[in-house]
Amino acid sequence: MVKCPQCAKKFNYHESKWRPFCRERCRQVDLGHWINETYTIPSKEPVSESDKKDE
């Protein structure tokens, strides 16, 4: 048994067709966080002043 990374519910990882999530809803919520840029991957490159002005 493992915990779902979205809702923390315990589930059997190998029996879930939505792994690493426990259900489709948790998978969709996680995808929404990526689409809305709630989750980001940090960049090693510093943001330049010209990039800041473009935003």
Image (spheres, rainbow, N blue to C red):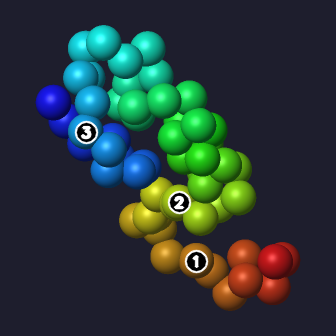
Closest to the camera, between mark 3 and mark 2, is 3
Q: Residue 17 appears at what percent x and percent y? A: 43, 14
The residue beneath circle 3 is 10
| 2 to the left or right of 16 | left
From the image, which quarter does the C terminus lie in?
Answer: bottom right
Q: Which residue is depicted at the point 81% across and 85% down?
A: 53
Q: Earlier in the sequence, mark 3 or mark 2?
A: 3
Instruction: Look at label 3 and name its amino acid.
Output: Lys
Vertically, is 3 above or below 23?
below
Instruction: Look at label 1 and name its amino acid.
Output: Val
Vertically, is 37 above or below 3?
below
The residue beneath circle 1 is 47
Asked which quadrant contains residue 9, the reply is top left
Judged from the image, the secondary structure of the residue bearing numbered disc 2 is loop
Give the CA separation, mark 2 to mark 1. 18 Å
- State whether residue 50 appears in this view: no
Q: Which residue is depicted at the point 56% across and 29% down?
A: 24
- State whether residue 31 appears in this view: yes
The residue beneath circle 2 is 39
Number of residues whose C-alpha sits closer than 10 Å to that of mark 2, classed few (under 14), some (14–19) or many (20 or more)? few
